Image: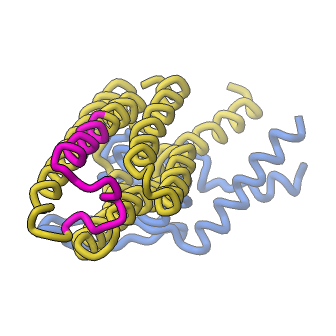
Amino acid sequence: MKKVLGNFNKAFESRVRLGIMSVLAVNRSMDFISLREVLEVTDGNLASHLRALEEAGYISMQKSFIDRKPNTKYTITEEGMNNFTRHLRALEDLINKQ
Amino acid sequence: MNQPDQHLEDIKVIKKLMEESSRFLSLSGISGIIAGLLAIAGAVVAKLIITGTFQPEDWYSTPFASDPAAHRTVVLLFADMAVVLVLSLAAAVLFSSRKARKSGHTAWTHITRRMLASLFIPLVTGGLFILITIGRVPANVTIASTLIFYGLAVISAGKFTLGEIHWLGVLEVVTGLICLLLPEWSILIWAVGFGAMHIVYGLLMHLRYKG
């Protein structure tokens, strides 16, 4: 049990962060607007969770311009992918133990 | 909520988000049925055009645009096919956006754009292929290429939508290859590929995913 909890990642305790990681794990990268649509959260809420994940080194951000409009794209990092996979496995183990 | 329940709920949320964010879920079954009916009507009209413009019995073994006298046939057939294509696409757009609205999804997302790009690359290639070869290959080869390129387009776009459409694409390609082998049955085979198969697919989707 202790080992399982060891893989349990505190950074993913929030649903929104878990959501961001799920979406980026399958799409690799996505822009802010699309993320907001898929996750159905407010701008401020999404931005703060994105910042937290970026600070943890799990995602990276690229700013660019498309048709002169600013576009912010988020991509999952290798570290983020590894940690998310480990977290998923820990979740599954916890459920299977019951 | 106690801990185990919360973990189970987490997994469910993850699964749902992974699916919704990477697939176009609003493709409407009804539009498949409509496309199939339009294709059958189009095939009947094509048959009438070919017999009505005094084409020889073995019209399929010579190119569609072989001589100036046959140009009228080609123009009529093109118009016929264009009407079928435009109406089918319109039905797909209309019913899919309606389905998206009903289920609270957004129809126009980055997935839709990626799906359309992977649909249109093989489709436009096929269109150009047909335009370039129409005066040089037997008519049944032209008919077969519409099925083959459309099938490849569906397989390629199928990666971004529900799994079953992949098999529709595979069947369209197989039908196209059969059309090459049985030239005298070209129009009937085309009607089965674009007509009957879309209707069956549309019905299955409609029953399975409601809409």
Palette colour of chain A: blue
Magenta stretch bounds:
B41-65
Q: What kind of secondary structure does the magenta stretch mostly adopt?
A: helix
**Left or right position of B135 against B6:** left
**Left or right position of B54 against A16:** left
Residue A36 x, y percent position in the rendering: 35, 47
Vertical placement of B177 versus B112: above or below? below
| Quarter-of-image position of residue B32 | top left
Q: Quadrant of the N terminus of chain B?
A: top right
What colour-coding does the image apply?
by chain
Residue B156 appears in the rendering = no
**In this orientation, which residue lies closer to the viewer: B178 or B95?**
B178
Residue B108 x, y percent position in the rendering: 28, 46
Residue A59 appears in the rendering = yes
**Left or right position of B143 against A56:** left
**In this orientation, which residue lies closer to the viewer: B181 or B40?**
B181
Q: Is B45 contained in the magenta span?
A: yes
**Left or right position of B56 against A80:** left
Residue depicted at x 28% and y 34% = B41
Vertical placement of B174 versus B8: above or below? below
| Quarter-of-image position of residue A30 | bottom left
Residue A88 x, y percent position in the rendering: 70, 53
Letter of the yellow chain: B
**In this orientation, which residue lies closer to the viewer: B133 or A94?**
B133
